[in-house]
């Protein structure tokens, strides 16, 4: 099976030896009980707080001698490559800090950005380094959303993250599912809809607050995405 996006779920492993091999990367984090895991002839015990990595194509065997709960992260190869997460699968099992373990219990319901942030903090835990470009990208998104009126340029985002523009675009798409410019337009339109519903600001004021060049530009982009002008949309919403 080739994954199109990460799959994160809790699983209980059976009390019998099973053998598996994946076309994707996998992380196994013990939450309760334990799972005996063998990869390439090397055995390990995945107990609460222990994170084991299984790289793509690696045959592995596992057995759960008693009741257990594990968090399993199935991660597409291309996704990991785009976000520079391959180092997760070149290391021995590691014991996570209590903080990272507690946060892992919420990953099933977390956004992609939260999952990526957690994975990067797992990578950074041994050396406490937090200067990698992917972490800069994670910090960039809320900064942009907090100042949508600014004349943002994708090449400036890439420079901020110390990445070539093409590499930045690949990482950005892997993280958000959108190209950088498309994501920015979506966030600006979302803010515009909020302002038109919650305030009596003029359409010109809304356009400027959301980073559009002028009301005409705002109207063109809004109509292209929503099939109605901002004024028509606002009038329709006011009747509900």
Image (cartoon, rainbow, N blue to C red):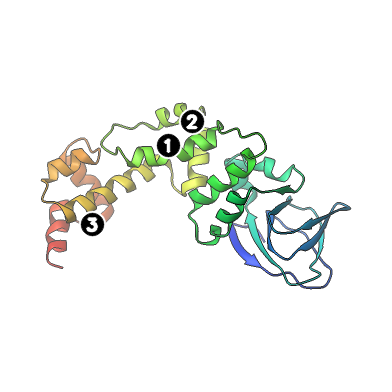
Label 1 sits on a secondary structure element that is: helix
Residue drawn at 75 percent across, 43 percent down: 91
7 to the left or right of 168: right
* Most foreground residue, 48 or 167: 48
Q: Which corner quadrant holds the C terminus?
A: bottom left
Q: Earlier in the sequence, mark 1 or mark 2?
A: 1
Judge left or right: residue 5 versus residue 146.
right
Which callout, 3 or 2, points at the residue further toward the start of the chain? 2
Give the image location of residue 26, x and y in percent: 69, 55
| Percent coordinates x, y for residue 133 in the rendering | 53, 33
Q: Determine the image quadrant of residue 28.
A: bottom right
Side of 6 relative to 87 (left or right): left
How far apart are the alpha carbons under marks 3 and 2?
35 Å
Residue 140 marker: 1
Residue 23 makes an appearance in the image:
yes
Image coordinates of residue 5 in percent, x first then y, are 56, 56
Confirm or deny contact between disc 1 and disc 2 (CB under 8 A).
yes
In this view, the mark in front (3 or 2):
2
Question: Mark 3, residues whose alpha carbon is within 10 Å: few (<14), some, or many (≥20)?
Answer: few
The residue located at (75%, 48%) in the rendering is: 93
Gap in angstroms between the C-alphas marked 1 and 2: 8 Å
* Residue position marked by numbered label 3 in the rendering: 227
- The vertical placement of 180 against 240, above or below, is above
**Which is nearer the eye, 83 or 146?**
146
Q: Which tag, 3 or 1, sits closer to the chain's start?
A: 1
């Amino acid at each position: 099976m080739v994954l199109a996006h990460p799959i994160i779920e809790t699983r209980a492993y059976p009390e019998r030896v099973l053998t598996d091999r994946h076309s994707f990367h996998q992380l196994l984090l013990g939450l309760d009980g334990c799972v005996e895991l063998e990869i390439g002839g090397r055995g390990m015990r995945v107990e609460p707080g222990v994170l084991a990595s299984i790289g793509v194509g690696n045959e592995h065997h596992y057995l759960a001698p008693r009741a257990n709960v594990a968090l399993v992260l199935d991660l597409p190869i291309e996704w990991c490559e785009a976000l520079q997460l391959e180092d997760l699968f070149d290391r021995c099992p590691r014991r996570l800090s209590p903080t990272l373990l507690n946060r892992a219990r919420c990953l099933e319901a977390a956004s992609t950005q939260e999952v990526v942030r957690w994975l990067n903090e797992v990578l950074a835990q041994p050396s406490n380094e937090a200067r990698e470009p992917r972490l800069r990208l994670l910090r960039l998104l809320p900064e942009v959303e907090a100042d949508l009126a600014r004349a943002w340029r994708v090449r400036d985002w890439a420079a901020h993250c110390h990445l070539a523009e093409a590499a930045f675009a690949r990482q950005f798409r892997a993280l958000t599912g959108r190209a950088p410019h498309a994501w920015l337009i979506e966030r600006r339109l979302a803010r515009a809809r909020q302002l038109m519903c919650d305030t009596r600001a003029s359409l010109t004021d809304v356009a400027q607050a959301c980073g559009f060049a002028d009301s005409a530009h705002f109207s063109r982009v809004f109509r292209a995405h929503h099939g109605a002008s901002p004024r028509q949309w606002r009038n329709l919403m006011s009747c509900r």
